[in-house]
Image (cartoon, rainbow, N blue to C red):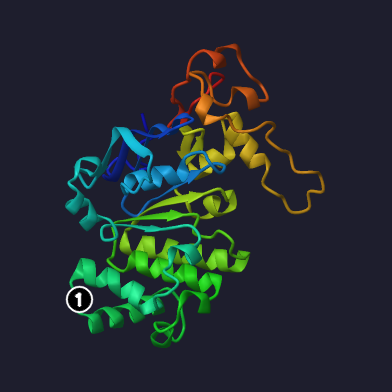
Amino acid sequence: MYAPLKKAHNRPLLQVRGLKSYFFTRAGLVKAVDDVSFEIAAGETLALVGESGCGKSITSLSILRLLPEPGRVVDGEIIFDDHDLLRMPPNEIRRVRGNRISMIFQEPMTSLNPVLRIGEQIAEVLRLHRGMTNPEALAQAAELLTRVGIAAAESRLRDFPHQLSGGQRQRVMIAMALACDPQLLIADEPTTALDVTIQAQIMELLSNLGRDRQMATLLISHDLGVVAGYADRVAVMYAGKIVEYAAVGELFKNPAHPYTRGLLACIPRLGDKNPLPTIQGQPNDKHSATDGCAFLERCPTPCGSGGSKIPQLKEISPAHFVRCWRS
C-alpha cells in the first residue's frame, strides 16, 4: 500500500511497489529495503528521510538497477512511465539511466572523475544519449553550467574537479544530471557538507528546475529543514521499511510514528536553550532482524504487539499512513 498522489487526476510517473532489496553476505541475509512502496507524479517532490543505514540510498540504487554486489532486488515492481524497470533488458535500462532518469550522487568530489576536465564529463553524457558531436556537446555543457549558476562557464569547462569549490562541484553534478532533460531526478543528499547559504541556493535551483520542467524529484535526505521547505510529500524510513507517509505539512503538524516524532524533536530551535532530545538506543542489527516491530527496543511507549508481528501501513487520516500498533 502507498499513499495516493495529492491530486487524484495526477498520473504517477514512477510507482515503486513492494520493493525488496537484500544483501546476501557471509554474515547472513541483510534486508536493506523490505517491502517499500511509493509513487511520484511529474512536477512533484517526494522526500525519503531517515537516519544513515535505513535504506534510502539502496532504494534509489535499486530504481536505477545499480545495486552493488552482493545486493539483489528479490521482489517488487518499479514502474516508470508504464514500463517495469526491473524487467528491462540491460541495453534498454542503459538508455533510460542518465537520460530519462538521472541521479545526483552523494559527495561530488568522489562522484566526479578527478582526472577528466569538467567539460568532458558533461559532454560524455550528451554524446552518449543525444548523439551530439564533441563541439556540440561542449557548447551545450557550457550552457548547462550557466543555467545552474556557474559564472564564466566556458572557461570552467577546462577545469578539473579539484579546482572547484564544493558548491560548484555540486552544481556540476546537477548540470550532468539535467543534461538530457530527465523526467525523474533522484537527488541523494544533494546538500551534504555544504554551508547553509549554498544549501539554500542548490535546493532553490532544484525546486525551480522541477517546476519549470515538470520534472519529478525523489529527494533523499536526513535534513528535515530542507525537506520542510522543498518537498510535497514525505516517506519516513526505518530499518528498510517506510514507517510513515504523508503530505509534508501534515507530517510536520501531526507526526504519528514515535520514530518520526523523535526525528522532529531533534531539530534545533532558535532560542531554545534546553539540550536536544535524542532517540535512545541503536538501530537494530539487520543481520538479526526479527519479524516484529523493528523500532520496538527504541520506542518510548512500546506495546505488547510489537514483538510478534510486523505492523502494516494503515491510513489514519486522508493520505496519511503509519506503520505502528498504537496508531
Q: Is residue 228 left or right of residue 84?
A: right
Up the image or down, 274 lies above or below 157; here it is above
Q: Secondary structure at mark 1?
A: loop
Q: In which quadrant of the rendered image does the C terminus lie?
A: top right
Provide residue 136's location: percent of width, then percent of height: 23, 81
Q: Residue furthest front?
A: 26
Residue in view at x 44 percent, y 63 percent: 111
Up the image or down, 47 lies above or below 160; here it is above
Provide residue 149's location: percent of width, then percent of height: 45, 76
Q: Is residue 156 left or right of residue 191?
A: left
Provide residue 288's location: percent of width, then percent of height: 53, 24
Residue in view at x 63 percent, y 41 percent: 264
Using the image as rendered, state which of residue 43 and residue 128 is in the foreground: 128
Q: In which quadrant of the rendered image does the N terminus lie?
A: top left
Provide residue 113's location: percent of width, then percent of height: 41, 69
The amino acid at mark 1 is Met
Q: Quadrant of residue 123?
A: bottom left
Q: Residue furthest right?
A: 273
Using the image as rendered, state which of residue 120 and residue 327 is in the foreground: 120
Residue in view at x 53 percent, y 68 percent: 201
Please count the marks in the image. Answer: 1
Residue 233 appears in the figure: no
Residue 177 appears in the figure: yes
Return the residue at label 1.
Answer: 132
Q: Quadrant of residue 11?
A: top left
Q: Residues within 10 Å of mark 1 (few under 14, many from 20)?
A: some
Using the image as rendered, state which of residue 125 and residue 276 is in the foreground: 125
